[in-house]
Amino acid sequence: MADADAGKAKYNYVVVEFPEEENEDGNVPMDIISERWLFKDKGQNMCYWPPYKSDLLKTKAVMSHQDFDKTKAGSCVVNVKYNSTEYSKAKSKMARLLQEQQDVSQTEEEVSVNVGRKKTIRTFPDFETNEMSSDDEGLVPAPPKLPQKKQVTSAVPTTPKTSVQDRDMAASTSNNACTCKCCIENKVMMRHLLQKFEKLSSDVKAVLNNPHRNYVAEDTQIEQMTFTTADNEQDLQHLENMLSENEYLLKACGTLRMLGGKDITETTRRVLAKMVSTTLAMKCNWAGRHEKIAFSKYKNILKLILATVRKNPHSREATQIEVENIVKSWLRTAGDRDGGRSKRGKAE
């Protein structure tokens, strides 16, 4: 350990190049060795090369300034480029030297390419480059063609146009127009299509400006009817049977939709209050449990409720499950309506 520390303190790390191993492109290999391996032979810088096949062992030998058997080591001619007491500095210096060497070789290669490049001779199309025959040697060559100047016309006419000239121009313009049967029919068809398009555009604007217009029109077309609220199960079954007819269903929907509502919940409750009395609602629930009337079995009545709710502009996006949940809640709270909650409070 002491020998290694003494070696590190005594010797430097040297960057050397090997001139005898110069490549074809002019680059000379470089490497880092220990100053301990340098020697001179007949005034020429030489170095011993460690007899290791592994690069890792060679690097360890360099970093530790290892001394080895010189009889087994090879020797090389070297040129010293740089030396330092730190291995990292020597390594970075060698990288810069190799990069500079590569840049110089690339520059020399570009110069050699430019030197060998043939100069391009420019030719002018205005002159003939063909060799003249012996008969044409005494002739004067033709002058180059000059570019023609654009004729500039004055914006102000030199002589005013007469009425006769105006009539002639109008006549020539009218003569250029196509008068065949096909073109005339196309013009008529295009005019008709434009009128249709303008009519459709005005109708679309009217619908957008008044989105409730279609509902009012339908209300005037559907005949209204007098709707009787069901008070018992027989009335509810009678309404279910009547709604099996499509005409009666449309009339009932047209009548109930006039009740309105600001949203899905309010519209559904208004329709239920018009169809079912509070007394009957207290005897019903959705599934018919606890010996009550099963409201879910009246499919036509539920169909009427859903259709009426969707006719309202404020609840047209209502889904079946939303309406059914509102019906369940309305039946469940039937006992609280018409003063039922206050009566229970007094009884308690």
Image (cartoon, helix red, strand yellow):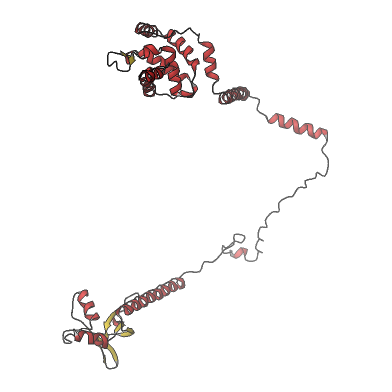
Q: Quadrant of residue 180?
A: top right
Where in the figure is residue 169, as x and y percent of width and height?
75, 34
Where is the C terminus found, in terms of image quarters?
top left
Task: Using the rendered image of the protein, determine whether residue 27 is visible from the camera's viewpoint.
Answer: no
Task: Using the rendered image of the protein, determine whether residue 241 is visible from the camera's viewpoint.
Answer: yes
Q: Quadrant of residue 209?
A: top right
Q: Answer above or below: position of 138 versus 327.
A: below
Q: Is residue 155 left or right of residue 106?
A: right
Where in the figure is residue 110, as x and y percent of width and height?
43, 71
Q: Quadrant of residue 301?
A: top left
Q: Residue at x 38, y 11 (%)?
A: 279
Q: How many discs appear?
A: 0
Q: Residue at x 73, y 32 (%)?
A: 172
* Camera-side residue of 85 and 289: 289
Where is the N terminus found, in terms of image quarters?
bottom left
Where in the figure is residue 99, as x and y percent of width and height?
37, 74
Q: Is residue 155 left or right of residue 288?
A: right
Q: Is residue 141 left or right of residue 306?
A: right
Q: Is residue 60 left or right of residue 167?
A: left
* Camera-side residue of 51 and 19: 51
* Camera-side residue of 322 and 307: 322
Q: Answer above or below: position of 201 versus 165.
A: above
Where in the figure is residue 177, as x and y percent of width and height?
67, 29
